[in-house]
Amino acid sequence: MTIPGITSTTKRRRDARFRRRRGAVAAISAVALTVGSLTALSAGEATAAPAPAPPGNAAAGKTIFLDPGHQGSAAGHDLNAQVPDGRGGKKDCQTSGATAVTGAKEHTVNWDIAQLVKAGLESQGARVVLSRPDDTGWGGCVDQRAAAASRSGAAVAVSLHADSTTRGADEGKKGFHMIVPALPIPDAAADRVQAGDGRKASETMRDAFVKAGFAPANYAGVKDGIQTRSDIAAVNLTTVPAVFIEMGNLSNPQDAAALSGKDGQLKYAMAITDGILNHVRGGAAPAAEPAAPAPEGAAPNSPAPDSAAPNSAAPNSNDPAATTPPSTENGADQGLAIVIPFVQKLLTTEDPAEIAELLLGEGQDVSAQVLKAMLTVVYGLFGGELPIG
């Protein structure tokens, strides 16, 4: 059948690209099966239960709660319904989030990156609980998501968001930041956790972003990648350590391109995975000095709702080495630093033979454990399934 607007030539080219991509995934699968520790990997394992982790892996058996901020639709619910904000006030139940200058929707950016993080964490033996099941249906109000995080008993709950400062392009404001709650929090349990492990987890995540080559936000009063606010229900109401990430400013063209592009999303996902793994190890990984933020933007930032408001950052998209030098003290840290540029090569290669050569060459330099994590992420980028058998 011919789809209106698609010529037969366009269709043939599209189908050819699809066949090459499927062939590429098949090549990756075939090589994966030759790696000793990967022989048990199957399509089901790549998308469902966590794979067995090597002995001594600190993530093994840990629960991680991932909240891809916002959602694609109201799904029959009232997004403007007022719910507790954790400070004695009320706020909107939920929103669909911001829209990037590239046209990408924040809720989809958050969802896509969360899927990559989930795959990476599960490959390390972690149990991942998501706040919402997909990018189209209902995911709960902000207070319901906080309650779900608390019930999960997670080692850390991570909320993924991307900021927006203007409706149009904002060249001046860019960068990531972690939002931490103003203390004290009225709820005693939340106050105790967020003042202690929650703050440590946020700082560990900040360090992972810096180590991955991302620069802290240069606006909204962010200091060393940290911003203090009182209006974020996700941290005010959560009784497990919470990290609230504004990954970048969707109004900034560079940040928006990185957040909506697959290679940029991979970098963000690897930084977030690294931060989570470092936290469950007790934050033992060496931290890089926070990069100096760029000059403060002219316009002040106003408080924002649980995400569609000002705050964020992004990587230097012009720096091909935007992944920091690997840590030699921890194999997982080293592997994650190697994986990012390696997978970027795979993503830009459509010839199955070239992919197989890359995997048999550079791929062998990556430890089996981290190679497994990398391949899981790659499978996610190609649709989450292995065309085996």
Image (spheres, helix red, strand yellow):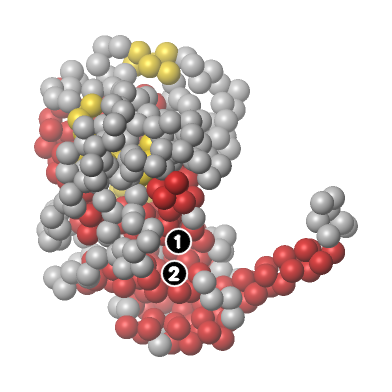
Residue pointed to by mark 2: 344
Q: Residue at x 39, y 74 (%)?
A: 342
State the quadrant of the N terminus.
bottom right
Badge 2 or badge 1: first in the primary sequence: 1
Front residue of 262 and 293:
293
Query: Which of these two is toward me, 269 or 121?
Result: 269
Q: Which residue was labeled with disc 1?
A: 263
Quick check: 145 above or below 285?
Answer: above
Determine if residue 389 is in view: no
Q: Please, what is the three-letter code of the amino acid marked with disc 2?
A: Gln
The residue located at (81%, 67%) in the rendering is 9
Image position of 176 with respect to 37: above or below: above
Q: Residue at position x 44%, y 69% from top?
A: 344
Would you place residue 309 above or below residue 17 in this image? Answer: above
Secondary element under disc 2, as helix, strand or loop, is: helix
The answer to which quarter of the image holds residue 190 is top left
The Cα–Cα distance between marks 2 and 1, rounded to whole angstroms, is 6 Å
Q: Position of residue 283 (x, y in %)?
A: 14, 54
Q: Is residue 273 above or below residue 223?
A: below
* Residue located at (44% from left, 66% from top): 376
Q: As drawn, which residue projects farthest toward the front?
A: 298
Q: State if disc 1 and disc 2 touch (CB < 8 Å).
A: yes
For residue 299, which numbered disc appears in the image? none
Q: Is residue 14 left or right of residue 161?
A: right
Q: Mark 1: which amino acid?
A: Asp
In percent of width and height, residue 160 lies at 37, 42
The quarter in which the C terminus is drawn is: bottom right
Disc 1 secondary structure class: helix
